[in-house]
Amino acid sequence: MFSLNHPNGKNFENKLTLTKTQQDNVVKWIARNYDFNKIKFNKFNKDKKTGSYHLLFELDDEYHTGLTTREIDEFNDEEKSVVLGPIEKFRAIEKNHVIAEKENVSIDNIQVQYLGE
């Protein structure tokens, strides 16, 4: 389950990180539904109160958003997809043809700036 919230508050652990493979998986999730050339991962943390994991990123230096998961292991799955919200904000970069979760998606042409770079 994914939620697109921006964490505000002081109940977060900031020392966590994701592997490059896990971050590449997130790029694939997004690339199934959206056309973009660049992604920058800005912040990853765990909410101590709820136990959720929050990942903040920006697409093409313009679209700032994030996603929330319950389990860190969800980032190990490359076959997911996400819908970014608010939907109206991301409509301009929606793909005309969505790539199904089980289909291969190439991220070779997407510039990725990983956490900590």
Image (cartoon, rainbow, N blue to C red):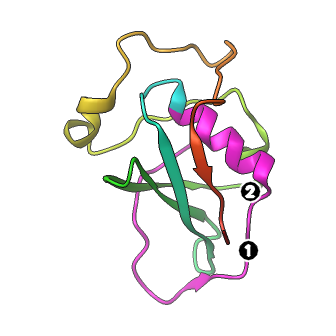
Instruction: Indicate the secondary structure of the residue bearing disc 2.
Output: helix
Label 1 to label 2, Cα distance in Å? 10 Å
Q: Amino acid at mark 2?
A: Ile
Q: Nearer the viewer, residue 106 or 3?
A: 106
Find out whether residue 6 is within the magenta segment.
yes
Q: Position of residue 24 (x, y in %)?
A: 70, 42
- Residue at x 43%, y 72% (from the top left corner): 7
Query: With 75 as the anchor, is 27 left or right in this view?
Result: left
Q: Position of residue 107 (x, y in %)?
A: 63, 30
| Residue annotated with mark 1 | 16
Q: Position of residue 59 (x, y in %)?
A: 42, 48
Query: With 70 as the anchor, is 38 left or right in this view?
Result: left
* Disc 2 residue crowd, few under 14, some 14–19, many 20+, Cα 10 Å: some
* Disc 1 residue crowd, few under 14, some 14–19, many 20+, Cα 10 Å: few
Where does the magenta region start and end? 1-30
| Residue annotated with mark 2 | 72
| Tag 1 near tag 2, CB within 8 Å | yes
